[in-house]
Amino acid sequence: MKIHLDSIGCRLNQSEIETMARQFRAAGHEIVAQAAGAELAVVNTCAVTADAAADSRQLIRHLARAGVGQIIPTGCWTTLQMKEAASLPNVLKVVSNLQKDDLVSEFNSESKIPNLEFETEPLARQPLPGLQRRTRAFIKAQDGCDNACTFCVTTVARGAARSRPLAEVIEDVNFALAGGVKEIALTGVHLGAWGQERGIHLRDLVKAILDQTDAPRLRLSSLEPWDLDADFFRLWENPRLMPHLHLPLQAGSESTLKRMARKTTPASFRALLAAARTVIPEAAITTDIIAGFPAETEEEFAETLEFVREMGFAGGHVFTYSPRPGTAASRMRGQIRLEVRKRRNRILREALAESAKVYRRKFVGRKMSALWESVTELNDRGWQMEGWTENYLRVRAAAFSPRWNEVDEVELVEAGEEGMKGRLVT
């Protein structure tokens, strides 16, 4: 059967879709890049914002218009809106997040397709066709979350925190490496909670991957600041662990953080960054900020803006607050007008863009390694490559031959608006 896979939202969704691709292929199905001609489509949906929920619905309708006769929605939006998802055109069945791991095996069983043992898959790792071809593999280490951040619907959609066994994660890492990827990115809803139910810590998983695999580059996705301590940063003494930390702040005002039920304060966040920079002085530290959280006063917004400027982030994402049904924040008094939320978003984005420029300029004239993620032919001038340095700086450089999925030493010669211009070191 020809199957099309797509997802909206986070890296965890992408990791899950890649796992489904492996499982469908093991059962003899063909994964196709385009919806046209596909007999089945699986969509991993998102609900983190109202826009993400709308995009999820739109994608399902688009697949139906493209002629896909059977569609299986899963993911966060589907879990929260099972009836609405089932009512969309050509939906065969809906699968909640808690049933997602069995989606492929149950589909094969219901379709009377022999259900092969997934561990007998060939080791050749095939990327998803189309634009989703990647040089790094997103490896799901954890799912769910026990936090109660008042704005977050993901905790409702994903359920309680749970960790994948260390051996399973190691197996997935080795599988991806055998397929040729050069970078492993660990991901989860609350990655820093990995192992807590077993009395162990994320540091134990990171050490195991570094000790038991040959991963050339290991990167961690978003980490909640309260899960870390100064000792955690000693892991970066191993150069295979990429010097990039994504630490969601959400607000720089202590009173706003309390309404969000975040387990951090500006003071503790400041101390954590100082500890990280003591051990990894040139690390890229990026963050997430919510603009226009309910009851946020102009004074609280000013505190957040000042704190963002103080922290010297290497970049980040700013989200206009979006009330999500079922969350405590959606029921709070003092909902901010949309135009005010958007204005605050713009100001915060400008502040983060400026601090990102300052960070990039520090590396002009430096030599760093880059993993090339895309390659474009430049006719007689050779090839233009784009990729990422260890500290997650986007870099462009020209070469006489295509170097996709290769790691090269690059001299960074110019800091641009979005990234760096580099020159290959021969």
Image (tube, grey):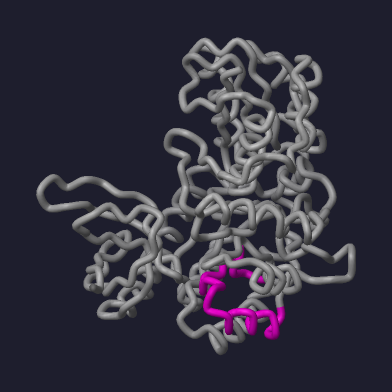
Does 129 sit above or below residue 420? Answer: above
Which region of the structure is painted magenta?
A: 229-254
Side of 146 where 180 appears, left or right: left
Which residue reaches farthest bottom?
278
Quadrant (top left, top right, bottom left, bottom right) of the N terminus: top right
Image coords of residue 212 (percent x, y): 68, 69
Q: Which residue is at 57% across, 29% downward?
A: 5
Q: Which residue is at 67% across, 39% downward?
A: 121
> Between 287 and 293, which is closer to the camera in this rendering?
287
Magenta stretch: residue 242 in it?
A: yes
Image coords of residue 63 (percent x, y): 53, 18
Q: Is residue 20 visible?
A: yes
Image coords of residue 375 (percent x, y): 30, 49
Side of 224 where 409 appears, left or right: left
Magenta stretch: residue 415 in it?
A: no
Rendered image quadrant of residue 18: top right
Side of 304 where 108 appears, left or right: right
